[in-house]
């Protein structure tokens, strides 16, 4: 009602059906959330527009069948048909308290309410709530605005009491009395005897004297205990107690039933709430709305708003807020009951969207703008996302030029790689050679050689330099699994990589494996390889120091062909390298015999090998 028509309306008769009550509750929650959003964002922000659109739709769905929504206003609650439908006991932000403090008792919303009127109403609340308490008056603001489809009720006696109080305050301000007319132009001399300033008297009223007497009796009674305390003192305390309590604030007058620990915890909660950022307040508001929302469509819409807000904060480089959003949603997901399967699925979908291509594009756009990035916060963001974020971190590694940023990304990859080496190996890609080389090093260096087996994926890697890095890392590992992977590199299309793999092979004792190498070295295809590759493979055979290897190398060294060829000569020279790497007395005797042979190059190779070989038994 307008102020001129403020008469107490009749209460709605009959019981309110549950559907109507639930719709009213939904509207008032959305109303409170819209006000909170408007305190954080400008009125034209997409988040505010979304809330106003949602509120408009919910008002239309309610007012179409019921024509009117009547909202009762209590100190910390909104009611509908006498039942609480929204409660917020935090005075600093409680919307019911905001209306209640100015004497508003009922709000009416009538059919015909449109989105513009809702938006104006929200803006009015925003403006009044941001004023100092002594200047804010929502009742007066509503009276001045005079909305056509939003009316209100405030008791006349409340307004009258306020007017009388203000009039009393105005009259209590005393002014200096006027001088008599005959003294208007006279000069008055005032003399003060300072020696008598300390000789004045204080005139006490009867009330003052009674209070002083009660206070003296109370003090005297406190000094005595047991049956000596007088009935007069007890009566004085009984009279003074209500008077003293009236002077205290509501908080000070409370019965101190809290323990010291509970009081400290309460103080911490209050302090935390007072220092809460607008961003965190908005996130808490949205998560609370999602938690309370029973309709899947409305819940999905709220999550979409949160996704858009998340991307907006990422584009500004505000990774702290992005981390907070994910943490709050994950916390809500963890606390959902078993029966909330639909809502849990929506939250899982939200968390999947967080690691979508849009998230990477937002971070990439930020980097392309060459803005300063808080890499510690960004990596915290990635850590919170978990394994799905590793692909984003891998993509960023090739983009950023900062050494610090790359170092932090590698720390993240190493941390997750220790838990799942296979996931780390899958991040290697020929289009990211720099990162792939780093991944090889991380896998080879994981504790207990957990990552060595995953280096097998690099045997067929397209980038040659990365394959070379894998061979070098496998050669340093000196594990049987590393040997098997290196054998796979012996078939690499690049000769230099085959040679390096052969040189990095560790000696093996498995007879079948040695026999396999002997057969391969005896083949026509092997004889067609270069001398350097032949030397590398036969040197590996020599390092096995097996009888089969000694027999093959000696036979190859002394093999004479009816028609000498380059390939046959290179095989004999390669056998010299194998016997030299064997370093046994039997190998030395074979080289000594070869040094007496007829072929000059073989004689020279055997003599040089004998010089390089350590003494027998060394």
Image (cartoon, grey):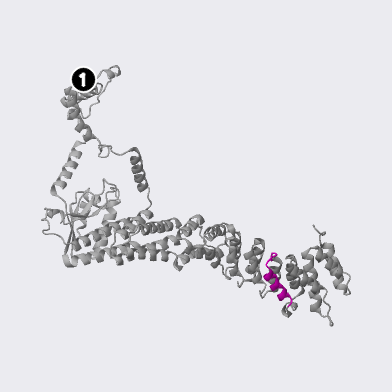
Along the line of sight, the residue nearer the viewer: 1 or 289: 289
Residue at screen point 30% across, 65% down:
298
The N terminus, quarter of image: bottom left
In the image, is residue 511 part of the stretch drawn in magenta? yes
Could you say where residue 518 lies in the image, as x and y percent from the top left?
A: 72, 73
The quarter of the picture where residue 290 lies is: bottom left
Rendering coords of residue 516 (x, y %): 69, 73
How crowded pointer 1 is (Cα within 10 Å; few <14, some 14-19, many 20+) is rated as few
Q: Which of 410 and 333 is in front in this view?
A: 333
The magenta span reads 505-522
Disc 1 is placed on an element classified as helix
Quarter of the figure with residue 542? bottom right
Total number of numbered discs in the rendering = 1
Q: Is residue 413 above or below residue 561?
A: above
Residue 115 higher or lower than 261, as above or below: below
What residue is rendered at 67% in x and 71% in y? 512
Residue 148 visible within the image: no
- Residue 178 is inside the magenta segment: no
Residue 270 in sight here: yes
- Give the left or right position of residue 7, taking residue 34 as reference: left
Whether residue 591 is situated above or below residue 224 in the rendered picture: below
Q: In which quarter of the image is residue 58?
A: bottom left
Please indicate whether residue 476 sits to the left or right of residue 304 in the image: right
Residue 91 in the image, given as x and y percentages of width and height:
28, 47
Which residue is more in the foreground, 417 or 278?
417
Q: Is residue 515 left or right of residue 264?
A: right
Lateral position of residue 182 relative to residue 311, left or right = left
Which of the two residues, 10 or 351, is positioned nearer the viewer here? 351
* Helix, strand or loop for the magenta stretch, by majority: helix
Q: Position of residue 523 (x, y in %)?
A: 73, 78
Q: Quadrant of the C terminus?
A: bottom right
| Residue named by callout 1 | 228
């Amino acid at each position: 009602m307008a102020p001129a028509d403020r008469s107490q309306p009749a209460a709605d008769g009959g019981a309110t059906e549950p559907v109507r009550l639930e719709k009213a509750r939904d509207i008032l929650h959305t109303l409170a959330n819209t006000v909170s959003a408007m305190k954080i964002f400008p009125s034209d922000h997409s988040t505010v527009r979304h809330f106003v659109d949602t509120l408009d739709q919910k008002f239309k769905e309610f007012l179409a069948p019921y024509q009117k929504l009547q909202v009762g206003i209590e100190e910390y609650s909104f009611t509908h048909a006498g039942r609480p439908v929204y409660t917020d006991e935090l005075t600093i932000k409680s919307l019911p308290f905001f209306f209640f403090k100015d004497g508003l008792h009922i709000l009416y919303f009538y059919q015909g309410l449109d989105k513009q009127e809702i938006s104006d109403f929200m803006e009015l609340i925003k403006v009044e709530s941001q004023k100092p308490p002594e200047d804010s008056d929502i009742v007066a603001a509503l009276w001045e605005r005079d909305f056509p489809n939003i009316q209100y009720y405030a008791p006349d006696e409340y307004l009258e009491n306020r007017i009388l109080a203000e009039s009393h305050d105005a009259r209590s301000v005393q002014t200096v009395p006027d001088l008599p007319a005959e003294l208007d132009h006279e000069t008055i001399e005032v003399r003060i005897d300072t020696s008598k300033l300390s000789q004045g008297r204080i005139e006490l009223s009867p009330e003052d004297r009674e209070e002083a007497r009660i206070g003296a009796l109370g003090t005297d009674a406190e000094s005595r205990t047991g049956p000596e305390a007088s009935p007069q003192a007890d009566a004085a305390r009984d009279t003074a107690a209500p008077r003293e309590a009236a002077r205290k604030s509501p908080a000070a007058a409370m019965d101190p039933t809290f323990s010291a620990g509970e009081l400290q915890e309460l103080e911490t909660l209050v302090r935390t709430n007072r220092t809460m950022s607008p961003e965190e307040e908005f996130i808490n508001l949205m998560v609370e709305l999602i938690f309370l929302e029973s309709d899947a469509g409305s819940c999905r819409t709220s999550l979409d708003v949160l996704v858009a807000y998340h991307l907006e904060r990422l584009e500004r480089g505000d990774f702290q807020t992005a981390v907070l959003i994910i943490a709050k949603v994950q916390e809500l997901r963890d606390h959902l009951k078993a029966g909330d399967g639909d809502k849990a699925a929506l939250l899982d979908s939200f968390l999947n969207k967080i690691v979508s291509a849009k998230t990477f594009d937002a971070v990439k756009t930020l980097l392309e703008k060459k803005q300063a990035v808080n890499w510690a916060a960004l990596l915290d963001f990635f850590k919170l996302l978990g394994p799905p974020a590793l692909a984003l971190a891998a993509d960023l590694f090739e983009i950023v030029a900062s050494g610090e940023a790359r170092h932090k990304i590698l720390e993240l990859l190493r941390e997750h790689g220790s838990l799942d080496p296979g996931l780390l190996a899958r991040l290697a890609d020929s289009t990211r050679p720099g990162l792939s080389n780093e991944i090889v090093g991380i896998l080879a260096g994981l504790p207990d050689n957990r990552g060595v087996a995953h280096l097998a994926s690099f045997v067929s890697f397209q980038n040659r330099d990365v394959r070379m890095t894998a061979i070098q890392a496998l050669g340093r590992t000196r594990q049987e699994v590393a040997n098997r992977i290196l054998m796979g590199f012996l078939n690499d299309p690049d000769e230099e990589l085959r040679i390096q793999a052969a040189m990095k092979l560790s000696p093996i004792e498995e007879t079948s494996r040695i026999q396999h190498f002997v057969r391969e070295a005896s083949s026509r295809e092997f004889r067609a390889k270069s001398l350097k590759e032949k030397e590398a493979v036969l040197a590996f055979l020599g390092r096995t120091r097996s009888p089969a290897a000694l027999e093959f190398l000696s036979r190859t060294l002394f093999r004479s062909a009816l028609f000498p060829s380059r390939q046959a000569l290179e095989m004999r020279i390669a056998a010299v390298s194998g016997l030299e790497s064997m370093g046994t007395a039997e190998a030395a005797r074979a080289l000594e015999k070869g040094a007496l042979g007829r072929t000059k190059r073989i004689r020279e190779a055997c003599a040089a090998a004998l010089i390089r070989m350590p003494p027998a038994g060394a």
